[in-house]
Image: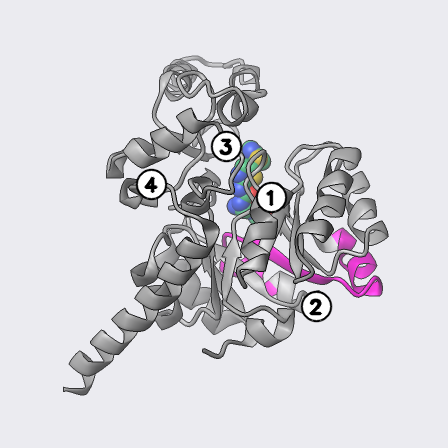
């Protein structure tokens, strides 16, 4: 198949693996890159030495292109920017903010920059400052989200910019992938489906919870106080909902409770397997996931299924 991002990034398939904190390590990202997609190491809130170790590790797993995601809320963001430059990383994606102030340093170092954006306004600003492509992420995604869904977000961004757009949020199989291309995307980013990849170093309780999730289980917490985050329903989301209800009824609510509730919660779920009280981030497509598979099986099935549905629908449209 052809897509502008295949040439831009020198990858085989237009599939990015979402940068999930604590989950997207060198093992997962290395497997995705080795299989022909774009593996992405998630910087998350990790300190520099942890991210550097993952970058060194992935270089031993694959010689194909990979990326590092910089979570702009990280307390170590400046260190991570230094790390990717020092380690000769070629592709950076960013999330949870505006990466403007780092763009010049990235480009001077020959790094391709691909920010995640939740709106047309930010997409246009990013194009103006010279980013190489854009990931348009709808709020069907897991983790920290914006306000628009993928279906209206992607075509509006495609119309607003000239650079390639990668669609993210709510894409879990070849049908979703084909739909994203219909909206004008040049690629897709997929997170939740890779959580249950055999190569993902994720506690079995977390994988099982994603596999068992129903369509309505991926809920949004802290939508009105703090940062909206999509996670699977559990004791933690019930505590958030209770705190939100109380905050609405209080004149000067103590909002620090929302930070407290979230602190360390993702590690508890991913590493320790506490999926009752931890933060089990997952997108709305969790309800479609039914089994663990290898990264290669996931990528092959995405490619074959998207190709098949496009051919099938083309027949319908062509009569
Ligand atoms: O970043 C993500 N997903 C994430 S980050 C994360 S850790 C975290 N948790 C709570 C608060 C902050 C971080 C867990 N999941 N996806 C990409 C994404 N980026 N979604 C939304 C955005 C975004 C939001 C606002 C990007 C830019 C933006 O710009 C605002 C501005 O500064 O103009």
Specify few, some or many for label 1: CA neighbours under 10 Å numbering under 14, 14-19, or 20 or more: some
Mark 4 is surrounded, within 10 Å at the Cα level, by few (under 14), some (14 to 19) or many (20 or more) other residues, namely many
Mark 4: secondary structure: helix
Q: Quadrant of ligand 1?
A: top right
On the image, the x and y values in percent for residue 128 come to 67, 68
Which residue is the site of mark 1? 27
Q: Position of residue 10 (x, y in %)?
A: 63, 71
Question: Of the residues under marks 1 and 4, which one precedes in the sequence?
Answer: 1
Respond yes or no on whether mark 4 lies under 8 Å from ligand 1. no
Q: Relative to residue 27, is residue 89 depicted above or below?
A: below
Left or right, 69 with reference to 310: right
On-image quarter of the N terminus: bottom left
Image spot of residue 314 (x, y percent): 24, 80
Work out how far the residue at label 3 is from the one at label 4, CA to CA, in angstroms: 15 Å
- Name the mark nearer the viewer: 1 or 4: 1
Residue, disc 4: 286
Mark identifier at residue 130: 2
């Amino acid at each position: 198949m052809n897509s502008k991002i295949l040439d831009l990034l020198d990858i085989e398939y237009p599939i990015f693996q979402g940068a999930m904190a604590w989950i997207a390590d060198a093992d997962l990202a290395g497997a995705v890159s080795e299989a022909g997609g774009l593996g992405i190491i998630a910087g998350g809130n990790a300190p520099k030495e942890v991210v550097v170790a993952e970058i060194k590790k992935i270089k031993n797993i694959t010689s194909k292109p990979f990326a590092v995601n910089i979570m702009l809320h990280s307390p170590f963001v400046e260190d991570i920017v230094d790390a990717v430059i020092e380690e000769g990383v070629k592709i950076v994606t960013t999330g949870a903010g505006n990466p403007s102030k780092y763009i010049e340093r990235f480009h001077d170092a020959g790094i391709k920059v691909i920010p995640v954006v939740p709106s047309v306004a930010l997409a246009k600003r990013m194009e103006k400052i010279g980013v190489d492509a854009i990931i348009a992420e709808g709020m069907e995604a897991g983790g920290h989200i914006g306000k628009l869904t993928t279906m209206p977000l992607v075509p509006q961004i495609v119309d607003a910019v000239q650079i390639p757009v990668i669609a993210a949020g709510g894409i879990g199989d070849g049908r979703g992938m084909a739909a994203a291309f219909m909206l004008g995307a040049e690629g897709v980013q997929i997170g939740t489906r890779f959580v249950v990849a055999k190569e993902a170093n994720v506690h079995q309780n977390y994988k099982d919870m994603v596999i068992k999730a129903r369509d309505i289980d991926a809920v949004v917490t802290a939508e009105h106080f703090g940062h909206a985050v999509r996670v699977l329903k559990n004791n933690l989301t019930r505590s958030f909902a209770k705190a939100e209800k109380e905050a609405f009824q209080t004149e000067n609510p103590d909002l620090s409770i929302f930070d407290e509730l979230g602190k360390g919660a993702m590690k508890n779920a991913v590493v320790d397997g506490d999926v009752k009280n931890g933060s089990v981030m997952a997108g709305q497509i969790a309800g479609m996931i039914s089994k663990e598979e290898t990264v290669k099986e996931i990528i092959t099935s995405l490619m074959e299924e998207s190709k098949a549905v496009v051919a099938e629908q083309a027949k319908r449209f062509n009569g």
